[in-house]
Image: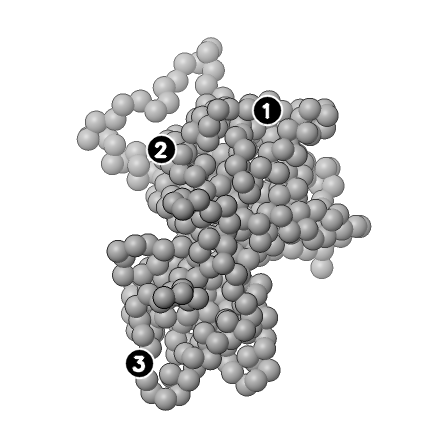
Amino acid sequence: MSLLQPKTLKPMSTSEAIAYAVKQANVDVIAAYPITPQTIIVERLSEYVNNGELDAEYIAVESEHSAMSACVAASLTGARVFTSTASQGLALMHEVLYIASSLRCPIVMAIANRALSAPINIHCDHSDMMGSRDAGWIQIFVENGQQAYDRIFQAFKLAEDEDILLPVGVNLDGFFLSHAVEGIATISDSEAAMFLPPRKAKYYIDSSMPMTFGAFALPDWYFEIKHQVVEAMEKVPKKLAEIEEIYYKMTGRRYGHVGAYKTDDAEVCLICAGSAAATAKFAVTSLREKGIKAGLLSIRLFRPFPAESILPHIKDVKALVVMDRAMSPGAPSAPIGQDIKTVLYDAGLNIPVANYVYGLGGRDISVAEFENIITKIIEDLKAGRPIERGVRYWGLRI
């Protein structure tokens, strides 16, 4: 049971919920450049600052590259820092993403996941973040507005922990979530302050105590410096679980590194990330009513990839269906598919994986389509047909 139950639900879009959480997190600096579909997030924050509801420095920059550069500089002064972007904006930041992680800047960024040009498309897929998945950022995917609101607080607490000190990206599906309105169970300002007190940086830019950040590194030390990011990443799963437990005691809500639904006895388990998990859950429920043992695993912590949380749910299945909302042209599998196959290989498991790319450029996927995908795999298993293990493209018109 929750120790502090919400008294009311506030109707908000996911974008507004994120902005409200950032305000309650009492950030010091926001550096922003507008880009669809994340613009509402930074618009609301600019209103909070302008109205005196948030005592923060709002920096309107000339590009997303500048936004992340300003965030890095502000973070190095000891400030609590936030920004938001999408698609080409994230791509333009790409260079600075690596700088932020290697300089151990605990920046939190919301990414309203959107397709990349060309051709121009403003709708959802995960190509933007999948293109930056190796930049050293902790990556969290959310399935609805409530998760997005809650994860912002957890992201700041995780990023600023002295054992972690890494930037965090909170990924929400563009339009499917960013513009969708739902009732959000909020916490009070006092509860937010109790969970997330002001940042106290151990090392920061101070003219009275000169330090060097981002100095030139020759081959004798560069490798070791970069490996420190790996070491910090390895601590994330345990630390996030501890943070979630604290948040759970305050709110009654926790999400885990993965979201498992009916996986205990599943013969076929579907794996995905983002808002499609909600649709897939309805499909699994429907299939269960028909006597088909389907299960669902939603990836919520994507980087570091939560292998230890995933394995117990998939080790006994007969086949896996991995859904990717991004392509990896030329690779043997799409991004999540690659990670799942690695997890299986390392565990010595030879479970067939059907890896589907779906929903690019905002193309929707229905409950019936998820049912069809799983049903086809079940039929192949019953007939003794081998599961096709290459990449498939669901809904592609050819």
Residue 249 position within the rendered picture, expressed as x and y whole percent measured from the top left: 67, 52
**As rendered, which of 47 and 57 lies closer to the eye?**
47
The span from disc 3 to disc 1 (Cα, nearest Å) is 57 Å
Give the residue type that dot 2 points to.
Answer: Glu
Task: State the residue position of label 1.
Answer: 58
Circle 1 packing at 10 Å, graded few (<14), some (14-19), many (20+), is some
Task: State the residue position of label 3.
Answer: 386
Residue 315 position within the rendered picture, expressed as x and y whole percent measured from the top left: 40, 72
Where is 129 relative to 323, above or below? Answer: above
The span from disc 1 to disc 2 (Cα, nearest Å) is 23 Å
Task: State the residue position of label 2.
Answer: 95
Give the residue type that dot 3 points to.
Answer: Pro
Which image quarter holds the C terminus?
bottom left
Residue 174 position within the rendered picture, expressed as x and y whole percent measured from the top left: 54, 48
At x 49%, y 58%, the residue is 363
Question: Element at badge 1?
Answer: strand
Give the residue type that dot 1 points to.
Answer: Tyr
- Whether residue 296 is visible, yes or no, is yes
Circle 3 packing at 10 Å, graded few (<14), some (14-19), many (20+), is few
Where is 322 relative to 159, above or below? Answer: below
The span from disc 2 to disc 3 (Cα, nearest Å) is 43 Å
- Is residue 281 rendered to the left or right of residue 374? right
